[in-house]
């Protein structure tokens, strides 16, 4: 069971991680939405892998998230705020902060991969929470809310 789920997860993550580049980089909004959808699917798969203690799948997913985190800033070129974009103007107003959030995702994914490699289930759970926290914080600060109001919270 673990070998089959790992193979399916790994193949899916690989294909999903390629999706932004299969669109020929002509539409940065679609490209970044594809990457974020990929991250979401990986995160959901990781949730199940954490429950099952499938450390190989966790490590593979974390490595894909690490690679995707490095790509995030480049998928937000200046002026790529459009009607179908879920990003707020805050991304470009505070681009250094935005890049820092992507760095936190990468760091969290690195920790998750290391915890999975050591097969430490407790640490895997903590690092998985750190990855989710990095995503959630970035979305709170730089993504349009699905509820009324949007944008970066004022300090």
Image (cartoon, rainbow, N blue to C red):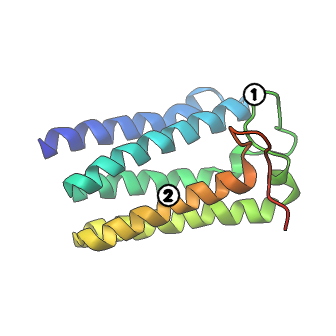
Identify the residue position indicated by label 1 in the image. Answer: 84
Please name the residue that numbered disc 2 is placed on.
132
Tag 2, which secondary structure? helix
Q: Which quadrant is the C terminus positioned in?
A: bottom right
Question: In the image shown, does 11 or 146 lie closer to the viewer?
Answer: 146
Q: Nearer the viewer, residue 130 or 107?
A: 130
Residue furthest to the left in view is 1
Q: Position of residue 28 (x, y in %)?
A: 72, 35
Neighbour tally class for label 1: few under 14, some 14-19, many 20 plus, Cα within 10 Å = few
Pointer 1 or 2: first along the chain? 1
Say which quarter of the image contains residue 136: bottom right
Q: Quick one: quadrant of the N terminus? A: top left
Residue at screen point 73% across, 56% down: 141
Which x, y percent locates residue 72? 64, 50
Q: Is residue 115 left or right of residue 96?
A: left
Tell me residue 85's x, y (percent): 75, 34
- x 34%, y 44%: residue: 45
- Which residue: 80% across, 43% down? 149
Q: Could you tell me which secondary element the residue under label 1 belongs to? A: loop
Q: Position of residue 116 (x, y in %)?
A: 28, 65
Image point (88%, 56%), residue name: 93
């Amino acid at each position: 069971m673990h070998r089959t789920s790992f193979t399916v997860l790994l193949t899916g993550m690989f294909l999903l991680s390629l999706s932004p580049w299969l669109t020929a980089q002509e539409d940065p909004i679609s490209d970044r939405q594809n990457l974020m959808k990929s991250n979401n699917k990986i995160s959901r798969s990781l949730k199940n892998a954490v429950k099952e203690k499938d450390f190989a799948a966790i490590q593979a997913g974390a490595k894909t998230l690490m690679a995707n985190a490095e790509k995030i800033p480049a998928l937000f070129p200046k002026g790529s705020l459009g009607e179908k974009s879920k990003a707020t103007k805050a991304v470009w107003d505070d681009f250094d902060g935005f890049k820092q959030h992507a760095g936190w995702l990468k760091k969290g994914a690195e920790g998750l991969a290391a915890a999975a490699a050591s097969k430490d289930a407790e640490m895997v759970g903590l690092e998985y929470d750190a990855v989710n926290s990095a995503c959630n914080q970035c979305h709170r600060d730089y993504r349009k809310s699905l509820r009324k109001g949007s944008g970066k919270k004022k300090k």
